[in-house]
Image (spheres, helix red, strand yellow):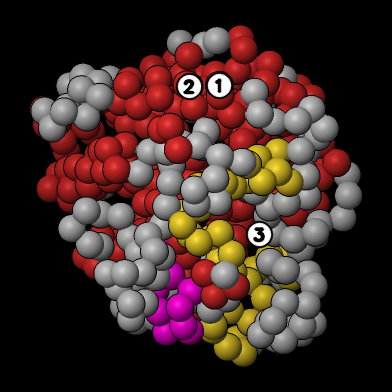
């Protein structure tokens, strides 16, 4: 362990002793949550899934209710990075060469994304989950080349007149193409730009990411800090034209996964910038989400769907938020609030593990996610990004229970 990691680990351990007291003690909490058992389950399920994937360059995306068959997609699909990313996490968890070999295979399917024009903003979802985790764990220089090239490709969608990245560079319903659209999901892709700017890429990438986060913070949220899914800007003046939904119940509703992207995104932006305004905002967008959750802490697909409690749930949003809360708790100076975040994340993981695991129903990890309900797509499905963030949250939780920081420190050139 190098000196930098020792310092980070020491600071984190001190913070956790102050903020969470005796809750961080071992891998099995007083509430009976056995994280090692859940990771063993993930290994078993993913091993079974691996046997079902054809050797033709395709990648698993989802499984329909009451089915055991994966739908496979190619590297262009926005979800293509989550399966190799999940495999990298299993390699990190087990140290088993089997997972490194499999992760490398599926990661390399995505190589064309770094050398073709940007199809949309999802390059961070695709490449940082796959190549990013791969480079973090192996330091393979070929992975780094792909990451840096992809960051430059994503940067071509940045409009300096607006100050954000264009999410969909094509006609999408209600986005008034060719005006400039930005969706909340895009917050997650900023991590690719931050990383590249600190690891050999242009420093301008950092400025683009900060600008995007700031403009989104100023235009994408209602007074109560619930988020709009999409904002359309005048591409020439940068003026906000309208704020609408694309995948939520209505333009005025809180779409669960959209709010989860905001919680995760602003937590990450604070990590990368250390600007207190982003930490304050992360707390605000988190508060409204937590306060409106049902008792079991797994959100309905949209908090304002009038058919609740008969509305479908979204396990993917719960997994994203659980992972984000664990990290956010380490930046929280208020000991009571830090403990609340950690405890809520633990309770979310426990609920997902006890009542949402796929087990013998299919070879995914989780059931009951909702993709695009207004379009009738992926309703109550097993979806690969739910699985990815579930494993990520389990690994973060395990590290914190051992008294370590939830994230490995990236090495900078």
Residue at image location 74% in from the left, 24% down from the top:
105
Q: Which residue is the site of mark 2? A: 43
Q: Could you tell me which residue is drawn at 22 percent across and 62 percent down?
A: 294
291 relative position to 381: left or right: left
192 shown above or below 104: below
Q: Which of 136 and 57 is in front in this view?
A: 57
Q: Can residue 253 be seen in this view?
A: yes
Query: Does the segment drawn in magenta span residue 248?
Result: yes
Residue at 47% from the left image edge and 70% from the top image edge: 217
* Viewer-side residue, 54 vs 57: 54
How far apart are labels 2 and 1 at the CA level? Answer: 6 Å
Assess whether mark 1 and mark 2 are in contact (beta carbons under 8 angstroms). Answer: yes
Residues in magenta, as a range: 247-256
- Which mark lies nearer to you, 1 or 3? 1
Image quarter hosting the C terminus: top right
> Are the residues at dot 1 and dot 3 in contact (C-beta closer than 8 Å)?
no
Mark before the other along the chain sequence, 3 or 2:
2
Which residue is label 3 attached to?
Answer: 208
71 vs 400: above or below: below
Q: Is residue 46 left or right of residue 3?
A: right
Identify the image quadrant of residue 401. top left
* Residue 236 horizontal/vertical position (percent): 76, 85
- Mainly helix, strand or loop, the magenta region? loop
Any part of residue 412 in sight:
no
Q: Which of marks 3 and 2 is in front?
A: 2
The numbered dot on residue 47 is 1
10 Å crowding of disc 2: few (<14), some (14-19), many (20+): many
Number of disc labels: 3
């Amino acid at each position: 362990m190098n000196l930098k990691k020792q310092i980070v680990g020491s600071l984190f351990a001190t913070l956790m002793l102050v903020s969470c007291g005796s809750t961080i003690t071992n891998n099995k909490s007083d509430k009976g949550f056995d994280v090692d058992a859940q990771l063993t389950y993930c290994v078993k399920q993913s091993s079974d899934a691996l046997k079902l994937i054809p050797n033709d360059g395709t990648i698993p995306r989802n499984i329909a209710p009451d089915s055991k068959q994966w739908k496979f997609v190619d590297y262009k699909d926005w979800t293509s990075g989550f399966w190799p990313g999940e495999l990298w996490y299993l390699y990190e968890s087990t140290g088993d060469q089997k997972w490194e070999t499999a992760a490398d295979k599926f990661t390399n399917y995505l190589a064309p994304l770094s050398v073709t024009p940007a199809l949309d903003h999802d390059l961070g979802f695709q490449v940082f989950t796959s190549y990013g985790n791969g480079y973090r764990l192996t330091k393979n220089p070929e992975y780094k080349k792909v990451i840096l090239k992809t960051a430059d490709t994503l940067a071509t969608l940045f409009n300096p007149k607006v100050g954000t990245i264009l999410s969909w560079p094509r006609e999408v319903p209600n986005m008034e193409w060719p005006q400039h659209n930005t969706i909340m999901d895009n917050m997650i892709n900023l991590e690719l730009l931050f990383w590249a700017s600190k690891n050999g890429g242009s420093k301008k990438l950092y400025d683009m990411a900060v600008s995007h986060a700031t403009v989104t913070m100023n235009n994408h949220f209602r007074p109560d800090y619930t988020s709009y899914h999409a904002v359309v800007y005048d591409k020439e003046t940068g003026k906000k034209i309208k704020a609408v939904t694309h995948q939520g119940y209505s333009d005025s509703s809180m779409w669960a996964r959209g709010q989860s992207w905001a919680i995760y995104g602003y937590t990450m932006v604070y990590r990368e910038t250390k600007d207190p305004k982003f930490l304050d905002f992360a707390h605000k967008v988190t508060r409204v989400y937590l306060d409106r959750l049902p008792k079991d802490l797994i959100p309905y697909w949209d908090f304002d769907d009038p058919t609740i409690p008969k509305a479908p749930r979204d396990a993917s949003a719960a997994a994203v938020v659980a992972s984000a809360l664990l990290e956010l708790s380490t930046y929280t100076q208020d000991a009571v609030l830090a403990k609340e975040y950690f405890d809520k994340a633990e309770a979310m993981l426990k609920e997902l593990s006890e009542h949402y695991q796929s087990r013998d129903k299919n070879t995914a990890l989780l059931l009951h996610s909702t993709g695009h309900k207004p379009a009738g797509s992926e309703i109550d499905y097993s979806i690969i990004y739910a699985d990815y963030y579930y494993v990520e949250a389990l690994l973060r939780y395990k590290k914190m229970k051992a008294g370590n920081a939830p994230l490995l420190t990236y090495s900078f050139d």
